[in-house]
Image (cartoon, rainbow, N blue to C red):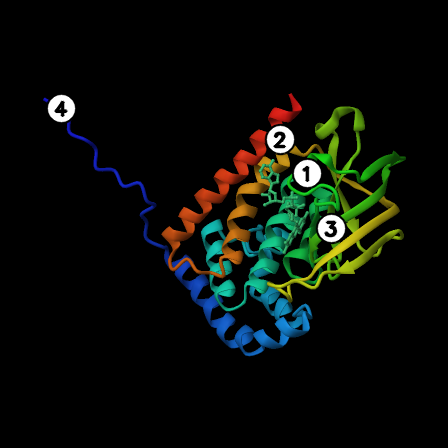
C-alpha cells in the first residue's frame, strides 16, 4: 500500500505578531498623512524629500534593523519589510530610500565594520541625521560588478580612491557612502574591498544627478573619486554579497513593487524569490573566480 503523502503547505503560513501589526499600522498612517499629500510635488520636482526622511528618522524607520545601542529601532526583518510595503504603497521613491539607506549603506557598516566604525558612523545614519549611499555600479560594470575599475591604493593607514560610480541611490544627497574598489588587483574579483567615504572628503564629487522615469524623488547620481583619502571598511566582497544581498534584494524588491504585496506571507514569497536571485548571482561570481 502506498504511503500516505504529507499534506505540507509550500506557502509561508504564519500569523503576524502584534509588533508587526503595530509597526505596519504606524507606517501606513505615516504614509497617508505625511507622504501622500506631496507625492506629485516631489515626483515632478525630483527634490529629495528631506523633511519626510527626517520624520522617518524620528520614527526609527531609517535605522529599523539596527540595535538601539547604535541608535536603531531594533526591529526584525518582517517589521522592516512591512514598513517598506506600507510606505511604497504610497510612494516607492521613499520606500527605496528606506531600503537603500538601511540595507546597503548602514547594514554594510553594521555587519562588516569594526566597533569604532560602527560607533562613529551608525548613530548619524540610524537617526537620518546623515543619509547613506552604497556605490558598486560603474559606467562600464553593472551586473558584472567584478569588472569594476575604481582603485584603492594603500597610503599609510588610509587608501587613495580613484574612479567613477554610476546610478548611486543617494549619490548627491548622501553624507556617508560605502564605496567598493579594487584594492588588490592581483587577486582579481577577490581583491575588491569596501571603503567608508564621508562625502565632503576632498576629491569626492557628485558628477550628475539622474533624471529618471520612476522613483524620481529617490536621488540617483553619478559620483567620482579623484585621489580621495578614505579608510578601509572591509577587505573582501564575497562575504558582503552573502550577508547583504538577501535583505537588500527583499527590501528593494518590495519598494519597486510599490508595496503591491497585500500581506506578509506574500512579502515572504517575494523575499524567497529575490534571495534566490541573489544566490544565483553569487554562484556566478564565485564560479568565475575559480
Ligand atoms: C533606480 C536605481 C538605483 C540604483 N541604485 C544603485 C546603488 O545605490 N548602488 C549601486 O551600486 N548601483 C545602483 N544601481 C545600479 C544597478 O545596480 C545596476 O543598474 C544593475 O546592477 C545593472 O547594471 P547595468 O545597468 O549596467 O546593466 P547591465 O549589467 O548592462 O545589464 C543590462 C541587461 O542585461 C542583462 N544581463 C547582464 N548580464 C547578463 C548575463 N550574463 N546573462 C544574461 N543577461 C544579462 C541584465 O539582466 C539587464 O537586463 C541603481 C540602478 C537604478 C536603476
Looking at the image, which residue is at 63% across and 37% down?
240
Q: Along the polypeptide, which appears first: circle 2 or circle 3?
A: 3
Disc 4 versus disc 3: nearer the observer: 3
Badge 4 local density, few (<14 within 10 Å), some, or many (20+)? few
Which residue is disc 3 drawn over? 166
Secondary structure under badge 3? Answer: strand
Q: Is residue 69 above or below residue 212?
A: above
Q: Is residue 212 above or below residue 233?
A: below
Residue at the far left in the pictured view = 1
Alpha carbon distance from label 3 to label 1: 12 Å
| Residue contact at pointers 2 and 4, CB within 8 angstroms | no
Which residue is disc 4 drawn over? 2
Percent coordinates x, y for residue 46 in the rendering: 67, 69
| Residue contact at pointers 2 and 1, CB within 8 angstroms | yes
Which residue is disc 1 drawn over? 145
| Residue contact at pointers 3 and 1, CB within 8 angstroms | no
Query: In the image, 85: left or right of 229?
Result: left
Q: Is mark 3 within 8 Å of ligand 1?
A: yes
Query: In the image, 71: left or right of 157?
Result: left
Looking at the image, which residue is at 60% across and 25% down?
287
Percent coordinates x, y for residue 45 in the rendering: 68, 74
Which residue is disc 2 drawn over? 285
Looking at the image, which residue is at 40% across and 47% down?
269
Secondary structure under badge 4? Answer: loop
Q: Is mark 1 within 8 Å of ligand 1?
A: yes
Amino acid at each position: 500500500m502506498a504511503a500516505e503523502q504529507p499534506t505540507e503547505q509550500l506557502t509561508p503560513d504564519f500569523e503576524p505578531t502584534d509588533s508587526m501589526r503595530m509597526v505596519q499600522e504606524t507606517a501606513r498612517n505615516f504614509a497617508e498623512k505625511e507622504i501622500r499629500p506631496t507625492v506629485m510635488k516631489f515626483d515632478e520636482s525630483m527634490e529629495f524629500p528631506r523633511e519626510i526622511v527626517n520624520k522617518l528618522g524620528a520614527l526609527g524607520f531609517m535605522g529599523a534593523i539596527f540595535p538601539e545601542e547604535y541608535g536603531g529601532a531594533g526591529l526584525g526583518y518582517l517589521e522592516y519589510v512591512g514598513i517598506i510595503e506600507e510606505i511604497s504603497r504610497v510612494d516607492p521613491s521613499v520606500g527605496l530610500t528606506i531600503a537603500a539607506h538601511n540595507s546597503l549603506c548602514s547594514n554594510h557598516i553594521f555587519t562588516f565594520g569594526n566597533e569604532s566604525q560602527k560607533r562613529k558612523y551608525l548613530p548619524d545614519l540610524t537617526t537620518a541625521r546623515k543619509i547613506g549611499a552604497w556605490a558598486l555600479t560603474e559606467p562600464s560594470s553593472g551586473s558584472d560588478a567584478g569588472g569594476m575599475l575604481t582603485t584603492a591604493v594603500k597610503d599609510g593607514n588610509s587608501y587613495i580612491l580613484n574612479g567613477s560610480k554610476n546610478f548611486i541611490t543617494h549619490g548627491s544627497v548622501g553624507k556617508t557612502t560605502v564605496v567598493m574598489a579594487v584594492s588588490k588587483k592581483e587577486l582579481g574579483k577577490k581583491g575588491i574591498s569596501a571603503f567608508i567615504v564621508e562625502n565632503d572628503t576632498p576629491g569626492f564629487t557628485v558628477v550628475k544627478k539622474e533624471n529618471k522615469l520612476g522613483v524620481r524623488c529617490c536621488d540617483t547620481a553619478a559620483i567620482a573619486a579623484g585621489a580621495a583619502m578614505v579608510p578601509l571598511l572591509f577587505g573582501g566582497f564575497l562575504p558582503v554579497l552573502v550577508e547583504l544581498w538577501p535583505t537588500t534584494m527583499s527590501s528593494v524588491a518590495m519598494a519597486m513593487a510599490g508595496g503591491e504585496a497585500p500581506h506578509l506571507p506574500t512579502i515572504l514569497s517575494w523575499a524567497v524569490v529575490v534571495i534566490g536571485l541573489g544566490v544565483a548571482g553569487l554562484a556566478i561570481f564565485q564560479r568565475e573566480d575559480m
